[in-house]
């Protein structure tokens, strides 16, 4: 599915905000803001990093205390005030009610509480040292379709990492809620309390609105009482996206395919209904991923989990589906060898999860025992197709007949569900006719918009936009062009190629291509010389996002030859140069 190239309002908003921040606010504004929450003590900004959704600045006080000051970026974030409030509620809840290591919340405020309201809302937390888990697990240089898991890592190291991740997922699963929605925080006798009063605010909703200018939901309306209603609503979001975006299809055949897939998914929903339809519901994060896990590079001990902005209470099945990040590759980019790798990592992960469950046996809630164990449910999710059904429900631009649907079909065939939900041909044709009219009108408007542009103007426009996105004059970092890694899947330059073409390329890659494109890793994890201090922004989200590469600092000790930042940059492709997530994206 292509993005909407006619509308540029969000891009213009993004550029305007970046320019204003650089010229009117900058380090001095951030320093004044941070000092306000430490009795006026002096601090200095030492690092700026722009990510998919936020700009983060590291400040250091005279006593070496370091904070992260983070600003949602308009144009990339559609509801910055609301997103920040919900994220703060989640962060505080996790800090108070779980053992998950997270940054400590210092302060937060609305745009009106910022000295410059145009800069908007902000959140301040402690700065957490560490490197992203993905930076230790990923093969470099990165192939065009996205991150790939290294093959030279011992199973013992994986087991240590997976054991910690299992504890984190079990902690989230220990939370019980009676509604599906976003957390709201209030104070009762100076003690925080939490409630669910509105619907979830998800990456899917944000990306469809920011990229394609389609509002698929009202996140301020009441929450959901059961899993079935919420899953139906996710399907309705994908259907509304298809109907309302005029260029959501490429041709008549594509329109036909997209319509049929949505109708069939709707009919298949009862076959994937949650066992715990009425709850309890669990805290679930759209963005739990190794890029947002900080670890000690020597001990592999997790130091913090960051980026909780797209977190809400969700059906238990969402939390009990095997994690798609086990091999780092996006599921939409998988080939046969990817499935083999995933099965191997699934075995390791579920073994670690079972061990973690045994250790927590006495404190587990009843639904986690016996057949309701997370480890049991995760294995089953990959055996009965639930894994792929969930991928489709949560996807943005890969909810189609070319990417995920072919991966789901073999499981439907095993279960005798291949004929479920096939729509009437007349209904299909009516939709195709409507969408072709939409597409024709869209293409005419796009042609009219572009016909008076000269090549020089186009180049100047693109360069100006990218320069705004990729860095500021006073950044202490090396600007690099970022790409989409989403919910659109990684690998293709989305500024030059429609998203549906990128998806096709991913689907068409072969095992031979994968083998020839990924060089062997020549160093071990222990030999990793550099600690990247700032955050990988990459979520399988953010088309045309940008990130600034932090200075890479060599470890103390050892007689390894020092490599310059420039040399590292030459060895790494654009996505490797996303800095790891200690400063949130």
Image (cartoon, helix red, strand yellow):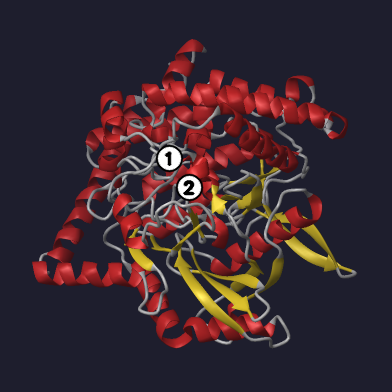
Q: Mark 2: give few (<14), some (14-19) or many (20+) Cα within 10 Å.
A: some
Q: Position of residue 493 (x, y in %)?
A: 27, 50
Q: CA distance from mark 1 to mark 2?
A: 7 Å
Whether residue 199 sits left or right of residue 527 in the image: it is right
**What residue sits right under mark 2 in the picture?**
528
Left or right: 449, with 320 as reference point: left
Foreground residue, 323 or 472?
472
Task: Name the residue located 61 percent from the left edge and 43 percent from the top edge.
Answer: 300
Decide which of 384, 61 is in the foreground and name it.
61
- Horizontally, residue 81 falls left or right of residue 245, namely right
The image shows residue 274, relative to residue 436, as above or below, that is above
Indicate which disc, 1 or 2, sits on the residue closer to the N terminus: 1
Residue furthest toward the right? 189
Residue 255 visible, this angle: no
Image x and y of residue 332, in percent = 40, 34
Give left or right: position of 13 versus 38.
Answer: left
**Residue lying furthest front in this view?**
559
Q: Nearer the viewer, residue 231 or 573?
A: 573
Residue 191 visible in the current orientation: yes
Q: Which residue: 58% across, 53% down?
A: 310
**Image quadrant assignment for residue 24:** bottom left
Image location (x, y in percent) of residue 69 = 58, 72
Residue at the (9%, 66%) spot, across then down:
455
Counting other residues with Cα less than 10 Å from the Cα at mark 1, is it few (<14), some (14-19), or many (20 or more)? few
Which corner quadrant of the image does residue 190 belong to?
Answer: bottom right
Could you say which is closer to the camera, residue 47 or residue 177?
A: 47
**Residue 583: image location, x then y, percent:** 55, 62
- What residue is shown at x 73% (from left), y 26% (from top)? 355
| Residue where numbered disc 1 is placed | 523
Is label 1 in a helix, a strand or a loop?
A: loop
Q: Are marks 1 and 2 in contact (CB under 8 Å)?
A: yes
């Amino acid at each position: 599915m292509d993005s909407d190239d006619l509308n540029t309002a969000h891009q213009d908003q993004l550029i305007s905000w970046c320019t204003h921040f650089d010229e009117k606010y900058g380090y001095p504004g951030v320093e004044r803001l941070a000092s306000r929450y430490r009795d006026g003590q002096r601090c200095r900004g030492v690092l700026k990093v722009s990510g998919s959704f936020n700009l983060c600045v590291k400040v250091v006080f005279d006593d070496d205390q370091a904070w992260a000051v983070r600003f949602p970026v308009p144009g990339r974030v559609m509801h910055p005030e609301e997103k920040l409030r919900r994220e703060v509620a989640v962060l505080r809840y996790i800090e108070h009610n779980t053992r998950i290591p997270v940054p400590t919340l210092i302060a937060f405020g609305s745009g009106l509480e910022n000295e410059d309201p145009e800069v908007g809302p902000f959140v301040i937390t402690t700065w957490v040292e560490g490197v992203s888990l993905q930076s230790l697990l990923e093969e470099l240089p990165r192939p065009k379709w996205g991150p790939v898991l290294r093959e030279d890592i011992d199973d013992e190291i994986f087991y240590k990492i997976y054991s910690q991740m299992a504890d984190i997922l079990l902690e989230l699963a220990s939370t019980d809620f009676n509604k599906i929605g976003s957390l709201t925080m209030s104070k009762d006798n100076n003690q925080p309390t939490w409630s669910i009063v509105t619907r979830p605010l998800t990456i899917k909703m944000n990306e469809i609105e920011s990229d394609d200018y389609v509002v698929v939901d009202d996140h301020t309306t009441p929450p959901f009482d059961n899993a079935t209603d919420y899953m139906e609503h996710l399907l309705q979001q994908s259907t509304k996206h298809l109907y309302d975006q005029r260029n959501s299809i490429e041709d008549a055949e594509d329109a036909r395919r997209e319509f049929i897939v949505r109708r069939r998914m709707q009919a298949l929903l009862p076959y994937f209904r949650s066992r715990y339809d009425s709850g309890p519901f669990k805290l679930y994060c759209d963005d739990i991923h190794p890029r947002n896990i900080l670890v000690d590079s020597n001990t592999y001990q997790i130091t913090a989990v960051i980026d909780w902005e797209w977190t809400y209470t969700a059906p238990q099945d969402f939390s009990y589906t095997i994690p798609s990040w086990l091999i780092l590759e996006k599921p939409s980019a998988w080939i046969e060898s990817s499935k083999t790798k995933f099965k191997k990592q699934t075995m390791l992960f579920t073994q670690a999860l079972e061990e973690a469950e045994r250790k927590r046996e006495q404190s587990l809630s009843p639904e986690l025992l016996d057949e309701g164990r997370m480890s049991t449910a995760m294995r089953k999710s990959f055996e009965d197709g639930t894994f792929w059904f969930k991928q489709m429900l949560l996807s943005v631009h890969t909810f189609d007949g070319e990417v995920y649907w072919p991966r789901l079909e073999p499981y439907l065939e095993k279960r005798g569900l291949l004929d479920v939900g096939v729509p009437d041909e007349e209904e299909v044709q009516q939709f195709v006719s409507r969408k072709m009219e939409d597409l024709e009108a869209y293409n005419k408007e796009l042609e009219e918009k572009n016909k008076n542009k000269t090549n020089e103007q186009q180049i100047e426009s693109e360069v100006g936009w990218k320069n705004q996105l990729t860095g500021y004059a006073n950044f202490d970092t090396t600007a690099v062009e970022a790409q989409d890694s989403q919910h659109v899947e990684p690998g293709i330059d989305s500024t030059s190629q429609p998203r549906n073409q990128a998806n096709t390329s991913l689907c068409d890659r072969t095992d031979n291509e994968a083998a020839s494109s990924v060089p062997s890793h020549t160093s071990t994890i222990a030999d990793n010389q550099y600690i990247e201090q700032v955050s990988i922004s990459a979520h399988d989200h953010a088309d045309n996002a940008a990130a600034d590469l932090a200075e890479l600092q060599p470890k103390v000790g050892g007689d390894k030859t020092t490599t310059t930042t420039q040399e590292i940059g030459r060895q790494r492709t654009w996505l490797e140069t996303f800095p790891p997530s200690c400063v949130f994206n």
